[in-house]
Structure formats: structure tokens, C-alpha cells
């Protein structure tokens, strides 16, 4: 009987820990402060350019890997949102990069898990990030403000 009680307590604790760890998955985390210009010693701009980020164009940058199952869902969500915003003043670029191939960029952007998605403005500055599979509505709302030329100036 005591063993059953211990197992029940352990199960409840495991579920609680799992819920706490997953509560932020898929949520858009906006940058709290206004984006700062890149530091002169930072090579972030060069790393982003090497990955395919185009100056003057907002970008949805998502890190993936061949072994990442949820990355396929991210690919579908991002492709759908980018297609919906294709007629915008500044249409966003859909850029998927392999974390193994662009490990230095992943370190620079503090990518800790896959999938991780970034919203970059037309200057290449991070405006938000999403860990896990983003919700299409949240991604669309966050990207919409970056696709208007007047807001990025």
C-alpha cells in the first residue's frame, strides 16, 4: 500500500514538472527592450548573411535538423504564414537552417533546443523568438508588424 502511495505521488510530481517545462513551448516571446544596434565586435551580421538573411527584408529564421521530428510541423506553419504575408509591403523570407551546419549562428543566437524560430526585422534584428512549434495565428500576428516598411525605420 505504501508503494502505491509513493508511485502516485511520483506520478503527480512528474506530470506537474512536465507541464511547467512545456508551458512556454510554442509561445511568442517578444524582446522586452527595443532592439539594439549590433555591437561592432559581434559577428552576428556576418553569420546571418552567411545563413541567407537578406538586408531590407524581414525574415522568419527557424533552426532545424534531420533528426528533429517537430521541425516538420514548424516548416508547414512557417510556410503557410509566409505565403499569407506574400502580398505585404515587405514580404517575409522563410529561412530554415540546419543547426549542425550553422552551429556558430545557433550559439550566437542562444538556441538551446529544437525547433526554435526567430522573427527578424528588415535590419536583421531579433524581434521575437519561439521555442517549439509556433501557433500560426501567433506567428502571423508577430510577423505582420514587421512586414510594414514604416515600422522598421
Image (spheres, grey):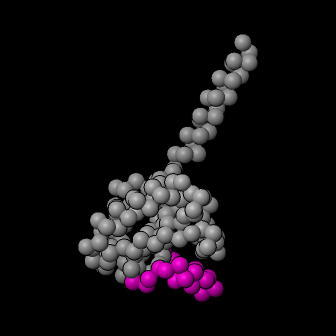
Span of residues in magenta:
35-56
Q: Position of residue 43 (x, y in %)?
A: 61, 83
> What's the magenta bit mostly, secondary-structure-wise?
loop
Q: Is residue 28 shown left or right of residue 85?
A: right
Total numbered labels: 0
Q: Measured along the vertical axis of the image, is residue 45 above or below residue 23?
A: below
Q: Position of residue 24 (x, y in %)?
A: 51, 50
In which quadrant is the C terminus drawn?
A: bottom left
- Can the viewer see residue 127? no
Please identify the quarter of the rendering in which residue 145 is found.
bottom left
Q: Is residue 42 magenta?
A: yes
- Can the viewer see residue 143? yes
Q: Is residue 149 shown left or right of residue 116?
A: left
Pick the residue in front: 125 or 11: 11
Residue occupying the point 39% across, 80% down: 57
| Outermost residue to the front | 66
Pick the residue in front: 93 or 68: 68
Q: Position of residue 100 (x, y in %)?
A: 63, 69
Please identify the quarter of the rendering in which residue 86 is found.
bottom left
Q: Measured along the vertical axis of the image, is residue 5 above or below residue 82?
A: above
| Outermost residue to the top | 1
Amino acid at each position: 500500500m505504501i508503494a502505491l502511495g509513493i508511485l502516485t505521488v511520483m506520478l503527480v510530481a512528474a506530470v506537474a514538472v512536465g507541464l511547467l517545462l512545456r508551458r512556454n513551448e510554442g509561445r511568442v516571446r517578444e524582446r522586452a527592450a527595443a532592439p539594439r544596434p549590433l555591437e561592432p565586435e559581434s559577428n552576428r551580421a556576418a553569420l546571418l548573411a552567411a545563413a541567407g538573411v537578406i538586408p531590407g527584408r524581414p525574415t522568419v529564421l527557424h533552426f532545424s535538423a534531420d533528426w528533429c521530428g517537430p521541425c516538420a510541423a514548424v516548416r508547414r506553419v512557417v510556410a503557410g504564414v509566409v505565403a499569407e504575408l506574400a502580398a505585404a509591403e515587405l514580404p517575409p523570407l522563410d529561412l530554415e537552417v540546419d543547426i549542425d551546419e550553422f552551429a556558430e549562428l545557433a550559439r550566437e543566437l542562444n538556441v538551446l533546443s529544437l525547433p526554435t524560430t526567430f522573427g527578424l526585422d528588415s535590419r536583421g534584428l531579433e524581434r521575437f523568438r519561439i521555442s517549439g512549434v509556433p501557433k500560426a495565428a501567433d506567428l502571423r500576428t508577430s510577423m505582420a508588424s514587421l512586414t510594414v516598411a514604416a515600422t522598421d525605420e
